Image (spheres, rainbow, N blue to C red):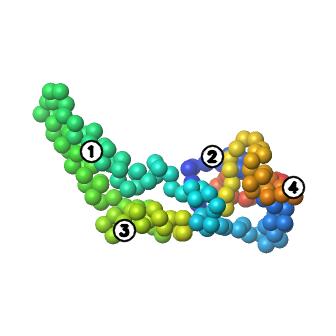
Amino acid sequence: MEILNNLEPNTQLQRYIDFSKFVDLLDTQTIFLSRVSYFEDQLEGGLTPTFIMSSNGMTNLLSQIVNSMPLAKPTPEEKAEQQDKKEALQTDYETRTYNTAFGKFPHSEVEYEKVFKQHRHWVDVNCWHANKSESMAMWKIYGESTKSVCIITNVNIYGLLPHCKV
């Protein structure tokens, strides 16, 4: 199981869940994973604009533009340094890879737009949040009824659900 964003081990996580689903979780000792493409909100679980810009090479191209701007009166060393940066950025751009649920792929083999569109069909998730307090909106959306519970746990090096309390 992969936990993104390097959460601290003591980060408290919460999950609102219908009581019958909670009982099923206890009985089966399994967590249900939903494909991101099934979410009602088409932006939920999607790739962030920052991730998209860095993955498709846009941030690299912006760096190339900035590093190509002429200096007022550059020294020969500054000109050489600027040229080296420009060449390194160009090489990075040409050899960039896309990180997907199935590994890394060179941009020369895969079109980024296809990767972006397919991402929601490749990823299955179980959603938790790290709010410091309870949320009525989360109770309403994920609890689905007045017969729901909030599971509270923390992240640690052994996994996601070792120390749960309800």
**Mark 1 or mark 2, which is nearer to you?**
1
- Front tag of 2 and 3: 3
Relative image position of residue 152 (x, y in whole percent): 77, 51
Query: Looking at the picture, which amino acid does disc 4 mark?
Result: Thr
- Residue 119 is at least partly visible in this image: yes
**Disc 4: which residue:** 146
Dot 1: element:
helix
**Quadrant (top left, top right, bottom left, bottom right) of the N terminus:** bottom right
Which of the labelled discs sits on residue 8, or is there none? Answer: 2
Residue at coordinates 30% horizontally, 66% vertically from top-left? Answer: 108
- N-terminal of the two: label 2 or label 3? 2
Give amino acid for label 3: Val
At numbered mark 4, what does the secondary structure look like: helix, strand or loop?
loop
Say whether disc 3 or disc 4 marks the residue closer to the N-terminus.
3
CA separation in Å, label 3 and label 1: 23 Å
Q: Residues within 10 Å of mark 1 (few under 14, many from 20)?
A: some
In this view of the protein, can residue 159 be seen by the observer? no
Mark closer to the observer (3, 4) = 4
Mark 1 sits on what residue?
Answer: 64
Q: First in sequence: mark 4 or mark 1?
A: 1
CA distance for labels 1 and 2: 35 Å
In space, the residues marked 4 and 1 are separated at their CA atoms by 55 Å
Q: Is residue 155 placed above or below 40 in the rendered structure? A: above
Q: Amino acid at mark 1?
A: Gln
Query: Nearest the camera: 54 or 83?
Result: 54
Q: Residue at x 76, y 45 (%)?
A: 135
Q: Residue at x 35, y 50 (%)?
A: 58
